[in-house]
Amino acid sequence: MSQLQSAETSAGPLGLIIIIGVVVVLVFTFWRSMRHRASAARVRSGPLFGGSTTARAPGSAATIADGGQVPAQELRGALGVRGETDQDADAEDAGTGAMLGLRYHRFRHNGSGLWDPTVYDGTRNGHQVFIRLGRNAAVRGPGINARRLRHLSAVRVAVSPFELVAADGRLKPKTPVPPAVDALLAQLAPSPDVWRDLRVVAGPAGLVASRAYAQDWVSGWIYDLWLLERLAAVLHGAPLPPEALGREWTPPYGMGDWAPSIGAALSGT
């Protein structure tokens, strides 16, 4: 009898701790969901959401001094090598690839219970470009593991090595950068909804940007493409010898699998 009473006594505090833990998780999840919903509503009613792809002429992106101040679809139109004509009957965004002069690899089920992400690749403006909207590898587990959901963009030109990170709505050097990059960054006004949770690595193997998928309400990869091509232009980057791209292409610098650490994700750095 004494052993049963002892077990009941020890189970009481443990059960209370479990209940409190579950309540905390539920409250945190609800709070985060409401915060994300408010953020999405704010951005969607703001000046950067949407816009028209016909507002600027195709091929005019090089004349834009600060892409972070241009509505997403307007910037997409300026990045285009031709106007958008998507005749796809299922209303998929296949027209974006043709508009940008890139091949479109539609997301697909790979037969193992996972989905391969959308990929755009090809050659534009004399250099190869690779864009992957999502991760090839599975992201298992809830919550903080979502930090591994990333969009990746690459422009294959050789430049001097440097690294940039997004902080406080700006792009900031993490390592010393060439004067031309300093001058470019000085032209960019703060844009917290564009320059956020972003890492850019540059070097002799090309320019690569990795951006968080979560809370990306402005199609941030469009801004990344503008940024990388702008960096390539001001640095007079030499196009790298063509490689076979596609889903199996391995981005340089380990960026294809990179994600911020749990500590960095929790701290927002």
Image: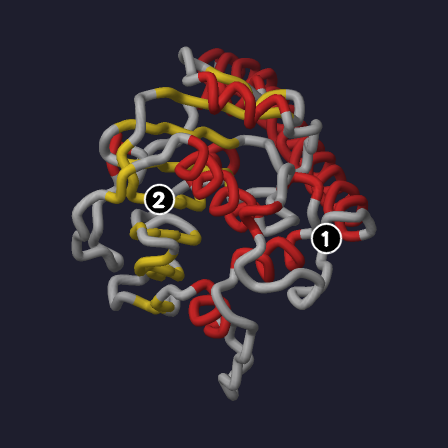
The answer to whether the residue labelled 2 contacts the one labelled 1, judged by CB atoms less than 8 Å apart, is no
Horizontal and vertical percent position of residue 15: 58, 24
Q: Is residue 162 above or below residue 98?
A: above
| Amino acid tagged 1 | Phe
| Residue in front for this viewpoint, 149 or 83 | 83
What residue is at 43 percent from the left and 39 percent from the top? 233
The residue tagged 1 is 49
Q: Is residue 76 above or below residue 144?
A: below
The crowd level at tag 2 (other Cα within 10 Å; few <14, some 14-19, many 20+) is many
Q: Is residue 69 left or right of residue 158?
A: right
| Amino acid tagged 2 | Val
Q: Is residue 227 above or below residue 173?
A: below
Residue 155 has which mark?
2
Which comes sooner in the sequence, label 2 or label 1? 1
What residue is at 44 percent from the left and 43 percent from the top? 229
The crowd level at tag 1 (other Cα within 10 Å; few <14, some 14-19, many 20+) is some
Name the quadrant of the C terminus.
top right
